[in-house]
Image: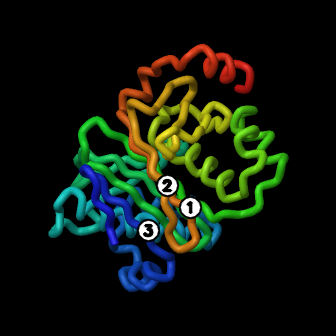
Amino acid sequence: MPVPANGRIERFAQFDELRSACELCGSAWLSVAEKRELDLLRDGSRREAWLCGRWLSKHLIREACVLPATKLELIEILSRDAEGRGMRPAVTVSGEPISASLSISHSTHAVLVGVTTQPGISIGVDLTIPETVKPGFLRMWFTEAEQERLKSADSRLAMTYWAIKEAVYKACQNGESFAPRKIEVFDSVEGRFGCYYRGTDLRDVGDIQEREFDGHIAVVATMLEAVAVDRRQTNDLHRTEFCETC
């Protein structure tokens, strides 16, 4: 079921739920440019994940933007620029950009999509399956402070931290590459997660929510779009830590 909250909708689905619908419609629901993106994927599992993600995303866009009569092929979602590089999903309807932010994440057999129509808000989602985390993974991708907090925690919390890093990056990035050690996660006093993104304290400019869907860790991050270009400084303690660990 969709989860509407303040102009935001999220939806989780297993590939098995979407596969038959996608197959019945062939490729008629894809635009020419979308078919070109799909053709870049040679691996069958990646193609299936891409198709399921696009199918669910188009239905969610149609729902969020109140476009019930719009044909799916007129809703275009592109995630590569003219040079073929990955980018934030760009959505157009009948060739015109729409004021909505979209994020898609896959696991090996499921997809999570988030969309918001709130002006000035960007969304990022991540979906992962809890698994054993090796010490080398923590040392490579987590700050010293995060490693200390996770020292006696179970692998689920470590994977939750990782999913938060992914979702926050998707919501905040402005063309920069993914640098996990520049995204620091912490537990706030209210029992919710907080985060620093490249030295910016996100507590006052965004929201991070974590939940579980069918054994998956799902994270949804919503941020003011301005945070991507107007990075406010953190306090001296965290500013020093970021300089030392980046």
Neighbourhood count class around disc 1 (C-alpha, 10 Å): few under 14, some 14–19, many 20 upward: many
Viewer can see residue 120:
yes
Pointer 1 and pointer 3: residues touching (CB < 8 Å)? no
Q: Nearer the viewer, residue 129 or 45?
A: 129
The residue at the point 28 percent across, 51 percent down is: 92
Specify the amino acid type for callout 1. Answer: Ile
Query: Residue 25 occupies which quadrant of the picture?
Result: bottom left
How far across and down, in percent of the image, does residue 176 sit? 55, 31
**Nearer-N-terminus badge (1/3):** 3
Foreground mark, 3 or 2, reads: 2
Tell me: residue 239, above or below residue 129.
Answer: above
Q: Nearer the viewer, residue 15 or 11?
A: 11
Q: Secondary structure at mark 2?
A: strand
Q: Secondary structure at mark 1?
A: strand
How far across and down, in percent of the image, does residue 199 sit? 56, 23
Viewer can see residue 97:
no
Residue that carries the numbered disc 2 in the rendered image: 210
Residue that carries the numbered disc 3 in the rendered image: 12
**Nearer-N-terminus badge (2/1):** 2
Q: Residue furthest top?
A: 236
Which corner quadrant holds the N terminus? bottom left
Residue that carries the numbered disc 1 in the rendered image: 217
Mark number displayed over residue 164 = none
Q: Nearer the viewer, residue 66 or 135?
A: 135
Q: What whole-number distance in Å separates the C-alpha atoms at marks 1 and 3?
A: 11 Å
**Horizontal placement of 178 versus 222: left or right?**
right
Specify the amino acid type for callout 2. Answer: Glu
